[in-house]
């Protein structure tokens, strides 16, 4: 493992900060100062110190939750009747939600203490795909669909490219999937409102390579090794 990656996985700092700390000569490997961030180390046998303190890789936890309605995506809100951490055993209170789903939105929510992964999954520059199942009022015509896919203006800024797949369309309701690569506040709801089709149901079913699957509302599970590895690959954390 590269020394820079080791430091970021220890929870001391981000990968970018680790680069500078190593170059400043603040890190020792087996008692010798190392200033090359790409130096290969073996965490099982090499001794790494930062400012004379021994460094160990932090144990990360990854939980996939199907967030129900009327649950707030936060760790603390005195006005909320239920928050997402209420749905998990108390030993997982230290985990942080990866992004936000508003109170009325359900579906896939990743919770973890891996700060670097949260950053990469949520920052727009990494363009991680998010797919939502949506029900809207009325029928979405081709012109409206193309407009949404090319981008609509919200708060003076055009949304990025999107993909829409119609599932069912009747007189009063349309069911569809929409894929976006952004995460603005209430973005999907506001996009459809911009073309006069209020959202009546919204569920996130996919984020990156993660899929909600058959988890019921309020249910959760740990990610397996393959899922974690795939997330690291698509966010560039395996480099």
Image: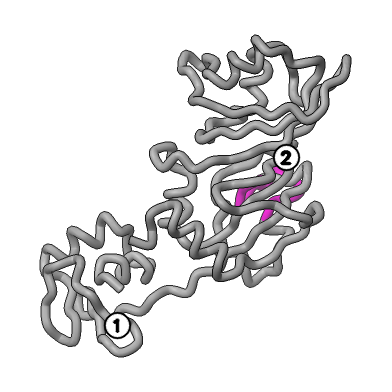
Q: Is residue 200 visible?
A: no
Q: Position of residue 114 (x, y in %)?
A: 47, 62
Q: Quadrant of residue 164?
A: top right
How many marks do you count on the picture?
A: 2
Give whichever of 68, 233 is nearer the camera: 233
Q: Which mark is residue 42?
A: 1
Is 119 positioned to the left or the right of 67 in the image?
left
The correct choice, above or below, for 158 with respect to 130 in the image is above
Give the class, few, some or many, for how many residues have Cα within 10 Å of label 2's Cα (few <14, many ≥20). many
Q: Position of residue 145 (x, y in %)?
A: 65, 17
The correct choice, above or below, for 179 with respect to 138 in the image is below
Q: Earlier in the sequence, mark 2 or mark 1?
A: 1
Query: Which residue is tagged 2?
Result: 203
Q: Give SS at disc 2.
A: strand
C-alpha gap between disc 2 and disc 1? 42 Å
User: Magenta segment range?
Assistant: 73-84
């Amino acid at each position: 493992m590269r020394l820079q990656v080791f430091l970021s996985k220890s929870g001391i700092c981000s990968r970018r900060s680790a680069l500078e700390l190593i170059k400043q000569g603040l890190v020792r490997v087996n008692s010798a100062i190392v200033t090359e961030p790409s130096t290969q180390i073996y965490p099982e046998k090499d001794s790494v110190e930062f400012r004379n303190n021994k460094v160990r890789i932090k144990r990360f936890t990854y939980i996939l939750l199907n967030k129900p309605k009327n649950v707030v995506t936060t760790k603390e809100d005195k006005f909320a009747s239920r928050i997402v951490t209420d749905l998990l055993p108390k030993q997982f209170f230290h985990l942080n939600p990866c992004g936000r789903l508003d109170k009325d939105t359900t579906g896939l929510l990743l919770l973890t203490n891996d700060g670097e992964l949260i950053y990469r999954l949520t920052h727009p520059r990494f363009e991680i795909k998010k797919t939502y199942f949506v029900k809207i009022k009325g029928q979405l015509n081709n012109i409206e669909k193309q407009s949404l896919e090319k981008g609509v203006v919200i708060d003076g800024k055009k949304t990025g490219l999107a993909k829409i797949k119609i599932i069912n369309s009747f007189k009063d309701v349309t069911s569809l999937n929409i894929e976006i690569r952004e995460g603005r506040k209430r973005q999907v709801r506001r996009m459809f409102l911009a073309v006069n089709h209020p959202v009546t149901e919204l569920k996130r079913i996919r984020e990156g390579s993660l899929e909600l699957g058959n988890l019921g509302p309020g249910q959760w599970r740990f990610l397996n090794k393959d899922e974690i590895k795939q997330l690291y690959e698509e966010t560039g954390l395996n480099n």
